[in-house]
Amino acid sequence: MSAATQSLPSKSRLSANTELARDIAGVFAREKLKPTKATIKATGKVVAEVAAAVSKLTAEQRRRVLVQEEALADAIEALVEELAARTDIEPQPVKVTKSVERHEGKGLGKKLTVAEGRKRLLAYATPQRIEDWAGDVAGATEIERTLGISRSTLHYWNTRGDVVGLQKGTRNRVYPLAQFIDERPVEGIDEVLNVIKNPRATWQWLIQHKPSIKGTPLDLLKEGEIGKVVKAAERDFG
C-alpha cells in the first residue's frame, strides 16, 4: 500500500483517492482477478477504514501489528465475512420529496376462449404481400437474367446462409434485391444470419432503422461496419 494511504483525513475515510484505487487495482491484477468498478470502490472503502485505524496507532503498536502479517490477514478476513453475513442491519430511510401517486389498473379482464381469441386476432391481421414489407424481391430466374448470378450459385449461397432467401407461397423462394452489390451478397449478411437464424426475421431487422447504431443495419453493412452490426444483432437476438 502506498504511503499516501497511511494517514487519511477523517473527512475522506470512506472515499478512496486515485492513488489508493491504483494500488487496489494492482493487487487485483497480481491475483489475476477481474474486478468491476463497484468492487474496487467497495474495497477502497474497506482499505481506507483500515488505514485510518492504523494511523491512530503509535509506531511501536504498528510494528507489533505488521510483524504478525498472517494473523492480521486472518483477522481482517474474519471481520469482513462476519459483517457480510449480518442480517440485523437497519435499512436507511429514503427521503421522499413528492407525494406518491397510487394507480390501479383494470386487471386482465375476462378470459377468452381459443376460438374467440383467434377471431379477434384475425380482425387485426390484414393480408400483406411480401414486397410490401421486404422491398423489391426476385426469384432465381429473374436474378440470373438481370444480375448475372447463376441459379446454381444463388442456390449454393442460400444453402450456406450467405444470402437471405424468403419463402413466397408454398414452393417459391425469392431474394431481396437490396442485399446484392456487384453481383454478390453484401459482406456481413452471413454473419447476421448466423446470429438471428431466421431469414424473414433477419431481413426485417436489416432494413429497419436502429437508433442504437444510427441507421439501418443493411446500410451500415454496405459501409463496411460489419462488427458494429453483428454486435447489435447479438444484443437484440443473443
Image: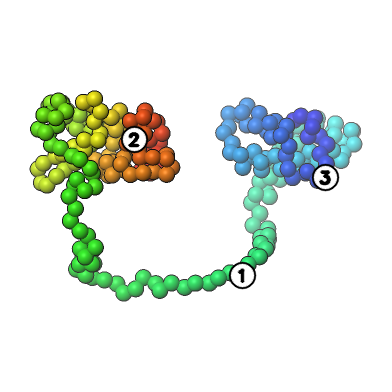
Tag 2: Cα neighbours inside 10 Å, few (<14), some, or many (≥20)? some
Which comes before the other along the chain, label 2 or label 3? 3
- 2 vs 1, front mark: 2
Tell me if 236 is positioned left or right of 147 in this view: right
Q: Which residue is mark 2?
A: 219
Q: Between residue 6 and residue 104, name the one nearer to us.
A: 104
Labelled disc at residue 99: 1
Q: Amino acid at mark 1?
A: Ser
How far is mark 2 from mark 1, CA to CA?
Answer: 48 Å
The answer to whether any part of residue 26 appears in the image is yes
Tell me if 187 is positioned left or right of 46 in this view: left
How far is mark 1 from mark 3, CA to CA?
Answer: 37 Å
Tag 1: Cα neighbours inside 10 Å, few (<14), some, or many (≥20)? few
> From what the image shows, is residue 75 above or below residue 191?
below
> From what the image shows, is residue 29 above or below residue 51?
above
> From what the image shows, is residue 29 above or below residue 57?
above
Q: Which residue is mark 3?
A: 10
